[in-house]
Image (cartoon, rainbow, N blue to C red):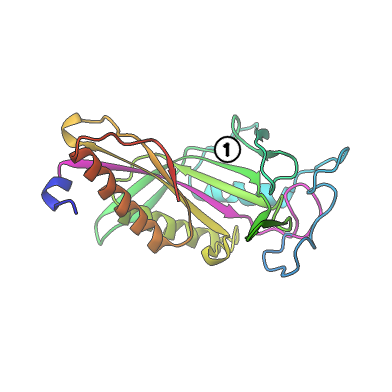
């Protein structure tokens, strides 16, 4: 357990990556229903979202309108040209062996979200980018076998990335809660974290305040499904990193669950 006096010598830096299922009738690149509540596995699938040879994906206009609405609500710049890219990796829940996403030219750049931390305490968190991509399928592990459900594959997924400029867990939690209100109010996403419609990943680093603006080694914590868990994960990671540094050890850049 690190004392409060030691904690005051360090500056935590936090950035968020938030994935949100867009609320649309159809999937991202085909006419299959985008139904998060479908109980029957592999019902809402077709040759396009299963990546059969020769199929031709077409963009979902409603999904594009949703991400642009979010970008405008968050004061983003909307470039004249946006494009999709391939993110190549092999995994059983991704039939194409690559994900259609955006990297070089996303729909929304920059932007900000004001946060009311107290009666007169107003903070503003800068947003790096918001881009659109397709979701993957769902894997269920049962003893010696793994089952895959492609109902979720190719559903429209919005990803928002903040600048790494938050310095405590309370602000990060409030950012997620405020974003969820906007998503629901504008009907961009149902943003139900229990159903996986909104998933948070946090990037945390700590550095001695005496080092000035120098950042520490970043550690990513993935797939957090509640705002309370976001707050707890950040506080735990801050304390873990400070404890290691106080022992003279180095922080390993890694991804943690």
Q: Quadrant of residue 127?
A: top left
Residue 105 place in picture, x, y as percent = 61, 31
- Within the image, what quadrant is residue 216 found in? top left
- Tell which of 122 and 44 is nearer to you: 44
191 over 92 or under it: above or below: below
Residue 201 position, x and y percent, is 46, 49
Residue furthest to the left in view is: 5
Which residue lies at the image location 18% right of the left edge and 51% below the top edge?
Answer: 2
Q: Quadrant of the N terminus?
A: bottom left
Q: Which quarter of the figure has residue 36?
A: bottom right
Disc 1: which residue: 78
Question: Does the segment drawn in magenta span residue 12?
Answer: yes
Q: Pointer 1: residues within 10 angstroms few (<14), some, or many (20+)?
A: some
Q: Residue furthest right?
A: 54
| Along the line of sight, the residue nearer the viewer: 172 or 233 | 233
> Is residue 26 a member of the stretch shown in magenta?
yes
In magenta, the rendered stretch is 8-33
- Give the side of residue 95 with respect to residue 158, left or right: right
Residue 4 falls left or right of residue 42: left
Return the x and y of residue 75 as percentages of the image width and height: 48, 44
Task: Using residue 14 as the reference point, say whether residue 96 is left or right of it.
Answer: right
Q: Which residue occupies the extreme front position in the image? A: 144
User: In this rendering, does residue 109 appear at all?
Assistant: yes
């Amino acid at each position: 357990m690190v004392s409060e006096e030691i904690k005051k010598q360090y500056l935590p830096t936090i950035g968020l990556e938030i994935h949100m299922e867009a609320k649309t009738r159809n999937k991202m690149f085909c006419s299959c229903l985008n139904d998060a509540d479908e109980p029957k596995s592999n019902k809402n699938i077709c040759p396009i979202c299963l990546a059969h040879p020769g199929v031709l994906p077409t963009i979902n206009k409603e999904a594009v309108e949703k991400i642009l609405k979010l970008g405008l609500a968050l004061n983003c710049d909307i470039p004249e040209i946006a494009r999709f890219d391939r993110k190549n990796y092999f995994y059983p829940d991704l039939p194409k062996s690559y994900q259609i996403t955006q990297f070089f030219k996303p729909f929304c750049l920059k932007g900000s979200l004001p946060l009311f931390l107290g009666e007169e305490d107003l903070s503003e968190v800068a947003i790096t980018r918001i881009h659109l991509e397709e979701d993957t399928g769902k894997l269920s592990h049962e003893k010696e076998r793994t089952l895959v459900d492609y109902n979720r594959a190719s559903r429209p997924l919005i990803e928002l990335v903040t600048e790494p400029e938050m310095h405590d867990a309370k602000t990060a939690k409030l950012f997620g809660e405020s974003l969820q209100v906007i998503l629901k109010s504008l009907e961009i996403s149902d943003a139900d974290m229990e159903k996986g419609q909104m998933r948070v990943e946090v990037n945390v680093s700590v550095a001695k305040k005496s080092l000035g603006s120098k950042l520490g080694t970043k550690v990513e914590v993935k797939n957090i499904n509640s705002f309370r868990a976001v707050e707890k994960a950040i506080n735990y990671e801050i304390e873990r990193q400070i404890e290691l540094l106080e022992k003279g050890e180095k922080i390993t850049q890694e991804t943690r669950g």
